[in-house]
Image (cartoon, rainbow, N blue to C red):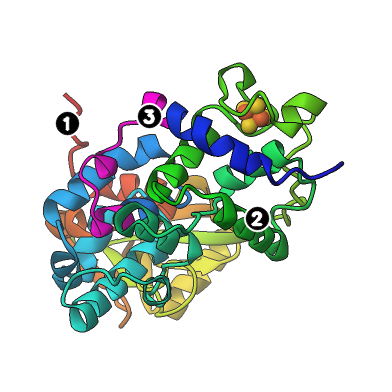
């Protein structure tokens, strides 16, 4: 298949006209600022727009600028982030805000290199901030842009490959609208999210690129973009314990590195432990159960790992130096990761915390 990269030039004017008529109204777009673009783009990584809206509003209401974000406690930040998952994003936001305050007086830097040097800010986020707020002609290349460009230009290279992405970025940098680079990026994002849909189901009849789109003309919308098959996720079995002592439940802090680093969790151990093995684990931790009851299984999918969990509830005596025993009030202040959602709900029951009022 021939590639037609000049189709990106042909797309520029109709794309912006389409954007002006059909753009999505989103809170971070209405009064854009580098901070708002940054926070929204970090939240939108791995999360759908619809799911981000409420989190974004709550986050901005409490942390309206980099200074407030830099000063917030880790625990409070994780509470605001709870439910969005992928907590490393929140950790990096926090660290980056502290750099922004200490090195840039609380305002995000204005160059691509300085933006990219902030924790958690890669090419994509730096380009979004720089194009939308500083007018720099930097394409924000994410899955949406790769899909649109590979279809419009008829490129059959694997878009998950870093070299291919660099090639796409160079072509897009040459074709981005220099007067309105932020609008061009957001138009491409919107076109990918609302018209040039994935999985071979684009709405070509509504698309401003239809007159010259290679995939549409050659019937290749089900083939492009080309993606190498994903590696299979590794399954990991874990056993989670809801340990109760004197009306309190045990939690502990995860280690400084790795999955869910530094977050609060219920004590848990590797493997799917039967009751005798569970008793051995409790003995190793230094606690002695007066009861041990299975409390169901749960599954949580991370990017590369899938946790397959089973749980036990145990009334215990004894203690472990890593455990913190929390009552209902303290438990409500914690940001337990979504991976433990099922067990957190059971812990609330056990602590007599009423379910949230949905009315
Ligand atoms: S014409 Fe169809 S395949 Fe081509 S960019 Fe538009 S929606 Fe995507």
Q: Residue furthest right?
A: 1
Q: Is 117 positioned to the left or the right of 331 in the image? A: right
Residue appearing at x 56%, y 43% in the figure: 144
Q: CA distance from mark 2 to mark 1?
A: 48 Å
- Mark 3 sits on what residue? 20
Cα separation, mark 3 vs mark 1, equals 40 Å
Near mark 3 (Cα within 10 A), the count class, few <14, some 14-19 or many ≥20, is few
- Give the Cα distance between marks 3 and 2: 25 Å
Q: Is residue 183 in view from this perspective?
A: yes
Q: Which residues are magenta?
A: 19-39
Query: Decide: marks 2, 1 in contact (CB < 8 A)?
Result: no
Q: Is residue 314 visible?
A: no
Is 128 within the magenta?
no
Identify the secondary structure beneath mark 1. Answer: loop
Q: In terms of secondary structure, where does tag 3 sit?
A: helix
Q: Which residue is mark 2?
A: 168
Residue 86 in percent (x, y) is at 43, 58
Q: Which mark is residue 172?
A: none
Rendering quarter of residue 33: bottom left
Asked if 249 appears above or below 154 in the picture, the reply is below
Q: Nearer the viewer, residue 3 or 118?
A: 3
In the image, which disc is placed on residue 357?
A: 1
Where on the picture, by quarter, is residue 87?
A: bottom left
Residue depth check, mark 3 versus mark 2: number of the one nearer the observer: 3
């Amino acid at each position: 298949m021939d590639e037609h990269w000049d189709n990106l030039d042909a797309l520029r004017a109709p794309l912006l006209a389409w954007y002006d008529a059909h753009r999505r109204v989103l809170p971070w777009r209405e009064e854009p600022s580098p901070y708002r673009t940054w926070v929204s783009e970090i939240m939108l990584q791995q999360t759908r727009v619809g799911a981000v809206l409420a989190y974004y509003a709550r986050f901005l209401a409490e942390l309206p600028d980099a200074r407030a974000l830099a000063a917030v406690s880790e625990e409070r930040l994780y509470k605001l982030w709870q439910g969005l998952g992928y907590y490393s994003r929140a950790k990096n936001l926090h660290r980056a805000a502290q750099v922004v305050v200490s090195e840039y007086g609380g305002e995000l830097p204005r160059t691509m290199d300085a933006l990219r040097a902030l924790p958690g800010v890669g090419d994509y986020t730096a380009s979004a901030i720089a194009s939308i707020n500083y007018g720099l002609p930097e394409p924000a290349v994410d899955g949406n842009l790769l899909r649109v460009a590979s279809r419009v230009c008829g490129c059959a290279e694997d878009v998950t490959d870093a070299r291919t992405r660099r090639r796409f970025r160079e072509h897009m940098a040459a074709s981005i609208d220099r007067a309105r680079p932020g609008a061009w990026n957001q138009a491409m994002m919107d076109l990918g999210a609302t018209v040039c849909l994935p999985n071979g189901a684009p709405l070509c009849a509504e698309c401003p690129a239809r007159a010259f789109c290679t995939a549409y003309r050659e019937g290749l919308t089900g083939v492009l973009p080309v993606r190498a098959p994903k590696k299979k996720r590794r399954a990991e079995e874990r056993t989670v314990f809801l340990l109760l002592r004197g009306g309190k439940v045990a939690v502990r802090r995860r280690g400084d590195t790795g999955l869910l680093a530094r977050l609060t969790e219920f004590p848990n151990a590797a493997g799917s432990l039967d009751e005798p093995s569970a008793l051995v684990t409790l003995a190793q931790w230094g606690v002695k159960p007066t009861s041990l009851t299975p409390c169901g299984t749960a599954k949580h999918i991370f990017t590369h790992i899938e946790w397959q969990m089973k749980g036990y509830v145990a009334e215990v005596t004894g203690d472990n130096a890593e455990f913190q025993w929390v009552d209902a009030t303290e438990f409500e202040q914690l940001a337990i990761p979504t991976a433990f959602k099922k067990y957190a709900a059971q812990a609330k029951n056990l602590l007599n915390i009423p379910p949230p009022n949905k009315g």
